[in-house]
Amino acid sequence: MPIEISEKTIKRDFIEKIIKLSGQDINQCFQCGTCVGACPMSDKVDTVPRKLMRMAQYGLEGPVGESQAYWTCASCYSCSVNCPRGIDLARVMEAFRLLTLRKTNEDKVKLSELPEELVKDLPQIAMVSCFRKLTS
Amino acid sequence: MKVTYYPGCTLKTKARNLEDSAVASMKALGVEMEELTRWNCCGAVHSLADDDLIHQVAPVRDLIRAMEQGSDAVVTLCSMCYNSLARANLIMKNDEVKRKTINDFMDEEKDYHGELEVLHFLNFIRDHVGWDKVREQVKVPLNDMKVAMYYGCTLVRPGNVSIEPIGDTKVMGEFLEALGATPVDFPMATTCCGSYQILGNPEAALDVSAAILESALARGAEAVILSCPLCEYNLAKTQGQLTEKQKLSKEVPVYYFTQLLALALGLDSEACRFDLNDHNCLNFLKSKSLVA
C-alpha cells in the first residue's frame, strides 16, 4: 500500500511529541538501515525500524499508529547501540508505544486471556516487563 | 568479606536455582551475601520515556535502602534487575533535573545522588574474589565440557551500563576457564532472546530463541550458561515446544552460571539445585560423570 505524504497526513504536533517523549533528534536519521540489520525481530514485523523512523520524520501519525512493529520490539537496544547517528531508537519505539497507548487505552496483552499454565510457569520479570511495555 | 545483595522477585520463586547456587558458592569462597533487609521489585524494565519518572522510584528506593544499610555497592544476580538498578543509578548520578524531581517526590527517604555502585555478580567475582581464588577452590573441574556463553541484552546494553565494553566481553569466558570448562563463543551470544515478547508475540520470541540455541550448537557447544531468569525461560523452558515445532534440532542443557560454579566447587545438590532445571540438564552432567 502506498503511503500518502501530504498536508492531510503530515502531523507536525506528532513529530514534536515523539521528539519530546523520546528525547531523540529523529531528523538525524539518514536511512542507512543499520537498525534493521541489528534488530532480531526485523524479519517478523510489518514495518522495519528504518521505515518507522522515516514515517516519524514526516509526522505520519496514521501509518505509524497502524504499524504493529513496535509492539514486537523487546527493547533489546541492538538498534540503539549500532546506530551510526547516535539515535537511541529504543526510546523512539517507546514513544510510539506510549503515544498509542495514551490515545487508545487499548492494552496489547490482556492478563485475563493468558493461559493459566503459562502464567504459572513464567518468571515474574516476564509479566512485569510485558505489562510495563504493552499495556496502558 | 560481606556484600550487600539485591535478589529481585524471580529469584525468590521461579529462579531459586540461581539464588541458592550463588549464595552457597559465595559462602564456600568466604563471601557472605547479605540480602537487603527491605527491598521491592526493581520494575524489571527501564522506562525510556522522558516524562515517565515514576517508574524510576522503585529501583531508586532499593538503592536508597542499600545506602541506608551502610553499603557502597549492591550486587545483583538477575540481569534484568542489574540493568534496571544500574540505569536508575545513572539518572540519579548524572541528571540533575530528574534527580531533584525524584528526590523531592520521595520525601520520606534520604536524598540520593547515585553514591552506590551497582555490580553484577560476574564482575563481583572477577574483581573482588578473583579467578585465582576460584581456581584454587575448584574440587570438580568441568573438564571436557564445552559451554556457550550467553550474555543476552541486559548485561551488555546500553553501553553505559554494560558489564564490559560492548563487543569485548570476556568475563563469562574467564569464569568458565576458572572452572575448567571450555568456553564457546558464538555469533548470537548477545542477541535478544525475545524477552517479554514470549507473552506479546510468542512465535517471534520462540523463533529467536531457537536461532540462538542453534547458533550455539553450530559452534560445538554442549551446554549454555546465562544469568537471566527470563532468558532461561525462553531458551530452556520452551525447548519442548521448540523441538516439537521443529524450530530446534535437539535439546541443549541450559544452566545459570552460578549452578556450574556450585558444581565445580563440589557443593551438594541443595546448593546446585539442578532439580529446578529441565531433566536434560542433570542427564548431561551424569553423562560427563560430574554428578552421581
Image (cartoon, helix red, strand yellow):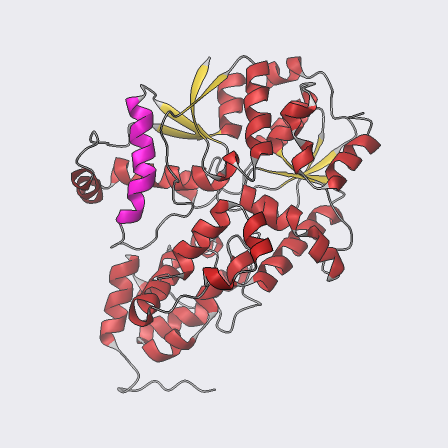
Which residue lies at the image location 65% right of the left edge and 48% below the top edge? B237
Q: Horizontally, is B290 left or right of B108 in the view?
A: right
- Where residue A112 sits: x, y (%)? 47, 62
Residue B54 colored in magenta in the image? yes
- Where residue B211 sits: x, y (%)? 66, 55
Which residue lies at the image location 27% right of the left edge and 70% below the top edge? A15
Quarter assignment of residue B268: top right
Quarter assignment of residue B169: top right
Which SS does the magenta portion mostly show? helix
Q: Nearer the viewer, residue B278 or B221?
A: B278
Q: Is residue B97 above or below residue B145?
A: below
Residue B92 colored in magenta in the image? no
Q: Is residue A39 above or below residue B154?
A: below
Q: Inspect this view and state whether residue B92 appears.
A: yes
Quarter assignment of residue B281: top right
Q: Inspect this view and state whether residue A39 appears.
A: no
Q: Is residue A90 above or below residue A14?
A: above
Q: Horizontally, is B39 left or right of A46 in the view?
A: left
Query: In the image, which residues are magenta?
Result: B53-68
- Where residue A51 sits: x, y (%)? 44, 72
Q: The C terminus of chain B is located in which quarter?
A: top right
Which residue lies at the image location 64% right of the left edge and 29% below the top edge? B259
